């Protein structure tokens, strides 16, 4: 069994122990969790966890893509959100407006993962970041607020 498969197997055991539902992604050392609840206007997100020999990466996807006419403002908002983050980053695909929060853990020298690292870091960080920045993201997407004003508001709420 490859290291990537071993890591995915451990992630699955942790999720199974919590009775969390997920789907394996065929042909990859990866899984997807759909419809995870949020406390912001976005209401829910999907999370994909990929494992390789060197990294374990989670992507928290929101279900709303940025329209072409607001992608530059959304990109500015996401870059302002990224500035100063200790780990992880927001990304946007300029071709279709897909937005996600990505976080990787270096697995090369790591002996293993802990339940806390999976639940609080791989899953929890994306959840916290989307909750924190989600309402501002929607305000920027719909032209209600400027990226600068939306960030100021998101980062003033702890």
Image (cartoon, rainbow, N blue to C red):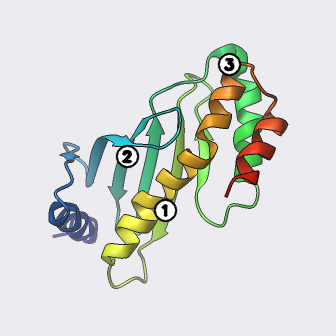
User: Alpha-carbon distance for marks 2 and 3?
Assistant: 24 Å
In terms of sequence position, does the residue under pointer 3 or pointer 1 come before the other? 1
Residue 44: x and y in percent read 41, 37
Q: Residues within 10 Å of mark 1 (few under 14, many from 20)?
A: some
CB under 8 Å between discs 2 and 1: no
Q: How far across and how far down the image is residue 58, in percent? A: 42, 54
Instruction: Give the secondary structure at mark 2.
Output: strand
The residue that mark 2 highlights is: 47
At 62% from the left and 35% from the top, the residue drawn is 135
The residue to which callout 1 is attached is 104
- Numbered disc in front, either 2 or 1: 2
Mark 3: few, some, or many residues within 10 Å (few <14, many ≥20)? some
Circle 3 is placed at which residue position? 142
For numbered disc 1, what is the local secondary structure?
strand
Number of numbered markers: 3
Residue beneath the point at 19% across and 47% down: 24
- Which is nearer the eye, 90 or 127? 127
């Amino acid at each position: 069994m490859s290291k990537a498969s071993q890591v995915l197997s451990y992630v699955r055991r942790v999720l199974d122990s919590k009775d969390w539902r997920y789907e394996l992604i065929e042909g990859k050392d990866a899984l997807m969790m759909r419809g995870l609840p949020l406390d912001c206007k976005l209401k829910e997100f999907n999370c994909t966890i990929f494992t390789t020999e060197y990294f374990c990466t989670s992507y928290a996807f929101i279900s709303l893509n940025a329209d072409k006419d607001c992608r530059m403002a959304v990109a500015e908002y996401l870059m302002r959100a990224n500035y100063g983050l200790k780990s992880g980053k927001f990304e946007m695909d300029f071709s279709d407006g897909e937005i996600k929060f990505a976080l990787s853990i270096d697995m090369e020298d790591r002996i293993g993962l802990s339940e806390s690292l999976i639940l609080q870091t791989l899953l929890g960080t994306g959840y916290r970041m989307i909750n924190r920045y989600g309402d501002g993201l929607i305000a920027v997407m719909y032209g209600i607020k400027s990226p600068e004003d939306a960030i100021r508001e998101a980062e003033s709420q702890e």
